Image (cartoon, rainbow, N blue to C red):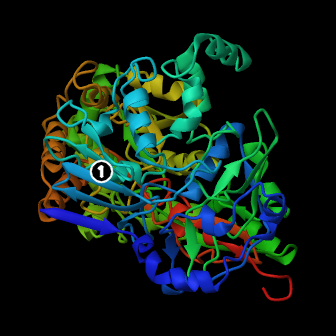
Amino acid sequence: MIKRRTTLGLLASAFLPGLARAGFVEPDYLKPLLRAAALPDLADRLPKKPRVVNLAGMGRKAGRYGGVVRTLIGSQKDIRIMTIYGYARLVGYDEKLALQADILESFEHVEERVFTFRIREGHRWSNGSYLTSEDFRYTWEDVILNEDLRPGGVQRELLVDGKPPRFEVVDKYTVRYTWDGPNPDFLPGLAAASPLTLLLPGAYMRQFHRKYQDNIRLSALMKEYRVKKWADLHIKMSRQYRPENPDLPTLDPWRNRTAPPAEQFVFERNPFFHRVDENGLQLPYVDQFILNISSSEIIAAKTGAGESDLQATGIDFSDYAFLKDSEKRYPVKVSLWKRTQGSRVTLLPNLNCKDEVWRKLFWDVRMRRALSLAIDRHEINMVTFYGLGKESADTVLPESPLFRPEYAKAWSAHDPDQANALLDEVGLTSRDEDGMRVLPDGRTAQIVVETAGESTLETDILELVTDHWRKIGISLFIRTSQRDVFRSRTMGGEIMMSMWSGLDNGVPTADMNPERLAPSSDEQYQWPVWGMHYLSLGQFGHAPELPEAAKLLDLLKAWRKTTETAERTKIWGEMLSLSTDQVFSIGMVNSVHQPLLRSSRLNNVPAEGLYGFDPTSYLGVYMPDTFWYSGSGDS
């Protein structure tokens, strides 16, 4: 069975007469380059079939060119926000999280095994060079399959039963990837906030590749860029997700013009961007994004002081009242979007911790359920989120078609009596003089919860949980740990319990991978050793000892083998039911809000949206290239 999905770009031919009548209006920003003949006219810069974005059909207004958007970032590496916001992908999600072609003109697949991609004829990189199947060939054969550039081999999302696809160039504008079995991760991987890399500008990158560059010139380039290996040079110059190389051609709506290190990064419009609005205006509307680096601790203060025109990162719900008050002093608007996490914060008992007594207790589902039942989520919601969140287990949100009320309710009611009864059943019946329960080895039952110390929200909530658990005879001690050592300490079993965000993607569809519900990664702090075993294909860590965790892995493997949406929906349901009933993660409150501040003159920024890294790429699926400034008198 062939499934075919296309983008509005295929309708471009129907719009082209209108585009011609529009006279291909040029941005003022580019007119100096046009007068100097340093840039071809728009008719020669656009693909033969550009992607036409019908804003009226999306309930938005077509805009006009011009303006600069200022935003604040916490460090140089955060320039990646432009790759996320720009959200130019071979295949991407729309606002309803349906996949559609974007950079590609179209794509089709047969049973998620054979994927055929059609490239837009005449599509150009930001330096004017043409995008063709040769760029895909270079990336696959000379980069992905090159042992120097990819010493770890082909990444997991491109493997099926441990084997990579067969790649072929069909013609100048068509490429194909073929696996023997279904690869359901392929298209979502291309649509991700940090997407799979299938496409590099080959003509530019060849100068850094040993196969195409002579040794003398290559050595000179290595010396110039201060690297010792040619592979390090190629990797440094080809970095797309964190676009630090201003010379690297891009397909994004804005391109970086600032070489690091710097305190301010300027991104300017890509004159060859492939999208146009229904009136023939080439997107993006905004000419520049200026990213100013600031200490993370004062981003909220600077945002509220009028130093940002568009801000969501670096601010949290705790800043909302302050930011809302800034509307009285500056021409800004503050709205609330809904975060997509299964729980804003969650407690993760480390089922692989070294402490044998606690590990045995955490393996007992009655212990995990008791800890969950003891938490007063209503108090947390009222105190921390002004009652605007939803008290829930760590699970999918109502916006997901997979949502069921019983998932949210699983062991999430405040019931200290039942929690005490469960702890008695576990065998923790002895108490010390302070009323705290005593472990089998004579120690006081104290749980040390570690956080990365990046938010006062975590410690505020933990202080409330401390009171809740004290009522069932469990002591809680809070310890902060640096993020860069957090993961290794958890893997080593040194962390007993951690506080982290909940399920990354709380708005999945059945065709999105349910791997976050199963031990599939060492970044899952409730079972990092089991996760590493799956991630490394059995080379490291070890398989789950708990039957329920092993069952989740079996279900995940079954999901990967089927291409039927109905069967995938069933598997998702089983995994959600099992994971919430077993309380492998102790969720608290979800559907919480994320402040978003914008200039009051910046149009097409939705008043409401789903905010998360996965799958909405923060603002990405809402297309910031369609945001535009109105004049001071017509806002």
Q: Nearer the viewer, residue 394 or 273?
A: 273
x%, y% of residue 312?
A: 65, 60
In the displayed structure, does residue 250 sit left or right of residue 302? left
Q: Nearer the viewer, residue 431 or 255?
A: 255
> Which quarter of the picture shows residue 246?
top right
Image quadrant in which the N terminus is located: bottom left
In the displayed structure, does residue 480 sit left or right of residue 288? left
Relative to 239, does residue 422 appear above or below in the rendering? below
Q: Residues within 10 Å of mark 1 (few under 14, many from 20)?
A: many
x%, y% of residue 51?
A: 49, 69
> Which quarter of the picture shows residue 411?
bottom left
How many numbered circles are shown?
Answer: 1
x%, y% of residue 27?
A: 75, 70
**Residue plotted at (54% across, 69% down):** 622
x%, y% of residue 629?
A: 75, 76
Q: Nearer the viewer, residue 414 or 258?
A: 258
Q: Is residue 606 visible?
A: yes
Q: Nearer the viewer, residue 462 or 441?
A: 462
Q: Is residue 374 visible?
A: no
Relative to 213, does residue 73 appear above or below in the rendering? below
**Residue plotted at (14% across, 43% down):** 181
Relative to 378, does residue 430 appear above or below in the rendering? above
**Residue plotted at (73% across, 44% down):** 296
Q: Name the element at disc 1.
A: helix
Residue that label 1 marks: 419
Residue reaching furthest to the front? 37
The amino acid on which the numbered mark 1 sits, given as a three-letter code, is: Ala
Relative to 213, does residue 165 appear above or below in the rendering? below
Image quadrant in which the C terminus is located: bottom right
